[in-house]
Image: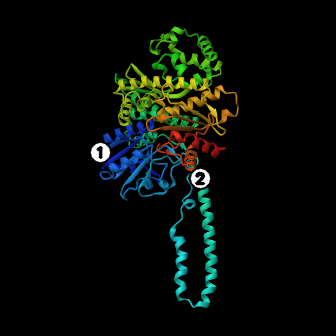
Amino acid sequence: MFITDIKKDFYEVVANQRVALLVAGDIDALCACKILQALFHCDHIQYTLVPVTGWQELGTAFLEHKEQFRYFVLINCGANVDLLEMLQPDDDSIFFICDTHRPVDVVNVYNDTQIKLLIKQDDDLAVPSYDEIFRDEDEENEDDSGNESDEGSEPSGKRRRFDEGAVERRIERQRARREWEARRKEILFDYEQYEYHGTSAAMMVFELAWVLTKDTKDMLWWAIVGLTDQWVHDKITHMKYVTDVATMQRHVSRHSHRNEDEENSLSIDCMRISFEYDLRLTLYQHWSLYESICNSCYTCCHFKLWTLNGQKKLQEYLADMGLPLKQVKQKFNSMDMSIKENLREVIEESSNKYGIKDIRIQTFGAQFGFKNRFLASDMVHAAAALLESTEKDESDTDNFIKALDSLSRSNLNRLLSGIDLAKKKLIAIQQTVASCICTNLILSQGPFLYCYLMEGTPDVKLFSKPMALSLLCKYLLKAFVHSTRNKRCKLLPLVMAAPKDVEKGTIIVVGIPPESETSDKKNFFGRAFEKAAESTGSRTLHDHFDTSVIELKTEDRIKFLDALITLLS
């Protein structure tokens, strides 16, 4: 059931208990986890933090902890399946679920005792009403049992007449039931057909902190980073992003206002958050402007930098801004102050000339002390690179802890190492996009586009991780739409596969919706993958919390793909 009063129904319930905190592996979940940890520290609430990357790990974690814990808080996992069916918990286990995955499973919505959903009701949830999908068993059994008890006592002549009426009633009831079941199936299909994302979990938990009047600037910054993660990884619509940014902006001005009264407004280790109308150039303040333009999806796709013509156009663009190459190619921090002062305006003006609209986007920046300034998107890229790092053979849990650490102000070195990893990742994505387009690896399969990264492609290990592959998928589709002349192909979704584990012979498959400015970001591949796997008996593993990401045996790739084409045609 949905919780209406988050303070009373959630926080006060767990306040004197031990809590198991099960956190999914994405940046929004990490940020929500940081805020919740800070609140738990405030009130001395004991908790155990368990990172989970998929349904199997969630099941294992629950089995390991169900003896010691009654209360489980699930962040960004658990809402979109029937959790009680999956985990089979005891009657006294209670689950608080703060999850952005939609649609929320109907059993979770209508379970009043064990499932408590920390989910915003004003998201367009469109949950079907109780009567449309559940029937009370008592109603059905009542009539049948009534007939049987009458039969024994009545004389035989009366019984025959009575029976005719009973049979007709029973047939009528069965017909009504069949109609109801068909209607229920249809309603559930419409409801569960598309996967999409709702309000950021970090924002939900920040709202709790605000209601408890325990919100700090750090918590506010984490909430902003959680929201920015949804935008960077293309989970929410532009409209939703702008609306949520406006909400966060109100909190930012409230916090800034609070600090202005004090006599010494900024101490050295203080943190200042500001609303920015900043450039869509990834990590540009920690890189050179030139490399950022070359490796940002937005500018790279627009100039088509994988062609010679595109490279030439980029040189003209830099010349038009009047920026010397020597300045553009050195670290942003080392550029002349005179150039940096009105850089954003200069870039915006030239971008409009070259048809690059919206080069600036509403976002937030944070200043840690005097020296370190980060945009929210810098934090997202750095934490994501640490979370899915493939450099050293470290476990998922180690990477999770590192990514969690990088979000703290006290661990600047960890954050900077994340930014370096993120640069490598972006360069790898850009090079892979260029090689896929130049060698025509993107094939039109009819109802969708398809691209398979072969074993042995450079950086292929990096793309065995779901977030990195999804980001590559998004960049590749955008680049393809900019480079193809085929109008029909511009409206197609993309399915992408990459090797997951060579020894086990598995690949990872991701599907994303078509690229368009007005896209509602609803993804139908989750259901399609399930159906295609079922109909062909392909050996798949639907273990990710995002249903549009699956693992598949390499030998079954062809038949799975054929089934998907038939299904979507």
Dot 2 corresponds to which residue? 189
Dot 1 corresponds to which residue? 46
- Is 160 positioned to the left or the right of 113 in the image? right
Query: 7 or 521, which lies in front?
Result: 521
- Is 312 positioned to the left or the right of 218 in the image? right
In the displayed structure, 150 sits above or below 70; it is below
Residue at (65% x, 40% y) in the render: 447
Residue at (62% x, 15% y) in the render: 308
Give percent across and percent down for residue 276: 51, 26
Sequence order check: which comes first, mark 1 or mark 2? 1
Q: Amino acid at mark 1?
A: Gln
Give percent across and percent down for residue 419: 43, 24
Give percent across and percent down for residue 227: 48, 35
Instruction: Find the residue positioned furthest to the front.
Output: 555
Say if mark 1 contacts mark 2, CB within 8 Å. no
Q: For mark 1, does the 10 Å Cα neighbourhood hold few (<14), some (14 to 19), or many (20 or more) residues?
A: some
Q: Amino acid at mark 2?
A: Phe
Quarter of the picture holding the C terminus? top right
